[in-house]
Image (spheres, helix red, strand yellow):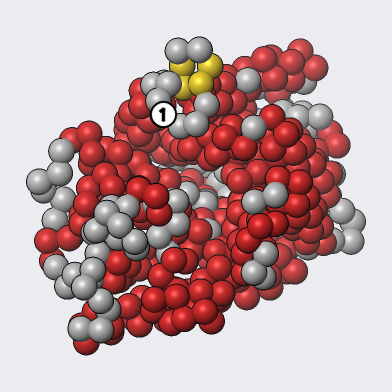
Amino acid sequence: MTARPTRTPPDAAGKGLQQGALGLWGNTVIGLGATAPAYSLAATLGYVVLAVHEKSPAMFLLAFVPMLFVAIAYRELNRDLPDCGTTFTWGTKAFGPWVGWMGGWGVAVSAVLCLANVAEITAVYLLRAAGLDELSENPLVKTGLGLVVIIVTTWISYRGILLSQRLQNALIVFQIVVLAVVSLAALALVYAGDAGPQAVTPSWSWFDPTGVSGSSMAEAVILCMFIYWGWDACLAVGEETQDSDRTPGRAALLATVILLGLYVVTAVSVQAYAGFGTTGIGLNNEAGSEDVLTVLGGPIGGPVLTVLLLLTVAGSALSSTQTTILPTARGTLAMAVYGALPKPFGRTHPRFATPGFSTVVTGASAGLFYVVLSIVSSNALLDTVASLGLAVAFYYGITAFACVWWFRRTLFRSVSNLLLRGLLPLLGGLVMIWAFVQSASDMIDPSYGNTTFGPIGGVFVIGVGMIVLGVPLMLACAVRLRAFFRGESLNAATPILVPETHEPPYGGS
């Protein structure tokens, strides 16, 4: 059964975006850039080791599985319904406008929470690479430089998708090359016996998840799972990609596989070189858990490698800043095109073919959020990062379940349909529910994170509070934009396609 012609969603040209601007690699690097692989490893690996000791490679492998399942859901939905609105559009068409709007809000929340953090990380590591360690601790300096980072990356995003891709090409290649050099050098020193007494020889047991307690495994898997987050930026720029119904899905899968290899190889090499001691560079030294990567530069390659690693983490955070703006702006563009946000969000720049208004609002919102939190408390800013996983699990879960529901009538037509459009996305969605509930239950403890609100942990309040804030905003939009929330088509070019009023292209292409 096929959709009626008037129900075809607006394409990139209809939204004012530049069609066919990206190829497979260009799309992939945008997904890779959004994950900030070097920074994610530096900031997360130490905490994973504290939770599961030498089993961190196993945790990266375990966490990859649900992310792969969700990526498959994204790919299948994109094949039938390529749209830069991603979770918003697919959630709306599967479950109706209320669920879809909240899914779109989840994407926006995760972006704002992430942007405030990666902008500051970029500033801090650039200052440290320049030898200005004292200034990197100065709140005024690092906040000012972080704000400049947001402004510059917003401007690049505003100027066009090709300029954004060129920046990402340079930053991603730089990250991969430096991480590869560090990993190979570390392993070479370990096997040559020149790494020092703290080093340990890699073991296949590191890839075996057995022997880890349930609570420790849950903590580690959730940490690992969310450092894969960001690959879905591939789908948000899908309408600007060649062969838009196929290439973005392939790019998403390719990005997750590249991340898996990068994370596992780096984790093994860092563990082998640093060892598991409780002092110095040992990975069980809690004092160094916030960054277990750049401290290895000096021991492995001296001052030059230290600076390169600092620049790599700075470039990684910068890459994420820019590629987080891209999908968020396109998500709000789609919401406006379908009538879920005021019309200005749906404007595209006539020359640059970018969602100009949405891009500026995304950057301004992130900048304002960052400045306010920096003024209020640096601890609050740290807790926004910890709460990010809740928003990610929220909208990934909606997308996974949307895939199952959208294709529900054709799941049993073939084994391929049952697996790729039913069972695997369903499992991915269920894991996202588990991750959300487990994370929320951990975060509600006042000892979790750096801030508290009475007897409740500040991370929980920020994470859940930001999601819940979407409800009154959605209701405010519902009052003004009644057609969308009734599931009515605004015009022939921009239909809503809610479950009660459409016959979806079950089975798709």
Q: At x 45% / y 74%, what residue is drawn?
A: 297
Q: Position of residue 61 (x, y in %)?
A: 27, 56
Q: Of 433 and 319, which appears nearest the observer?
A: 319
**Mark 1 crowd level (few <14, some 14–19, many ≥20, 10 Å Cα):** some
Q: Residue at x 22, y 34 (%)?
A: 215
SS assignment at label 1: loop
Q: Position of residue 164 (x, y in %)?
A: 71, 65
Residue 53's x, y, as percent?
Answer: 22, 52
**Residue visible at 81% across and 29% down in the picture:** 342
Nearer to me, 225 or 45:
45
From the image, tell me which residue sits under label 1. Answer: 448
Instruction: For residue 308, say whether it is visible.
Output: yes
Q: Write down the quadrant of residue 288 in the picture.
A: bottom left
Q: Is residue 413 left or right of residue 308?
A: left
Is residue 489 depicted above or below 137 in this figure?
above
Q: Is residue 256 visible?
A: no
307 relative position to 224: left or right:
right
Placement of 357 over or under 276, stated as above or below: above
Apparent side of residue 445 relative to residue 120 in the rendered image (left or right):
left
